[in-house]
Image (cartoon, helix red, strand yellow):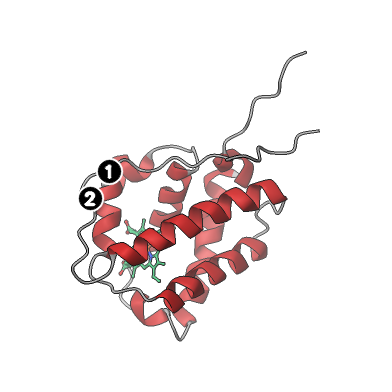
Amino acid sequence: MTEKAVPTLYEWAGGSEALDRLTETFYRSVVKDDLIGPLFAHMDPGHPRHVAMWLSEVFGGPDRYTKERGGYPAMLRHHLGKAITEPQRRRWVSLLMDAADEVGLPDDPEFRAAFAGYIEWGTRLARQNSQPGAEPPAQAPVPHWGWGVAPPYQP
Ligand code: HEM
């Protein structure tokens, strides 16, 4: 019996097109939000696409954020000194999950658990690293997130 190959989270999500749709929709609601909108008032117009590139790389897609945007050190720099609060972090997560539903990212339990796991981890690091006086590592690889203990259900 041959075993099915396990797709990456990137493939399961629908690739870069799906992640672009996700971040476009997400940042449209972010900029209108009273709690976190002001943080993004001077956002680069390419921001949604850049974050989609980051997420693609994390979830096993092409390493475009590393090649074209400067990888982890560049991402880190964008958060330093922003003093993100816990309510702001929670709002960011909540709006992203709303956007995931709105654009129809796969909603199976395994995908959403893995997706939420990375988002929870990443936003907590972003909050910590954004505090005044934080000294996060200046260099680190872009994380590669997988399915964890619940690989996709493939009957
Ligand atoms: C998993 C969590 C997160 C990821 C993957 C992420 C990713 C990124 C990336 C890749 C950039 C740089 C984009 C570029 O190269 O142009 C960035 C910038 C930024 N992020 Fe995050 N971020 C996360 C969480 C957060 C949270 C929780 C907040 C605040 C509530 C936040 C606020 C910002 C801001 C204000 C910028 C700079 C925007 C600008 O002025 O251009 N991030 N983020």
Q: Quadrant of the N terminus?
A: top right
Q: Secondary structure at mark 1?
A: loop
Would residue 45 be visible to someone looking at this image?
no
Give the residue type that dot 1 points to: Ala
Between the C-alphas of marks 1 and 2, the distance is 7 Å
Mark 2 lies on residue: 137
Seen as rendered, the residue at the extreme top is 1
Would residue 42 be visible to someone looking at this image?
yes
For the residues bearing labels 1 and 2, Cβ distance under 8 angstroms: yes
Q: Position of residue 102 (x, y in %)?
A: 66, 65
Q: Secondary structure at mark 2?
A: loop
Q: Locate residue 85 relative to residue 21 in the image: left or right.
A: left
At 22% from the left and 64% from the top, the residue drawn is 134
Q: Which mark is on residue 111?
A: none
Count of labels in the image: 2
Mark 1 lies on residue: 140
Give the residue type that dot 2 points to: Pro
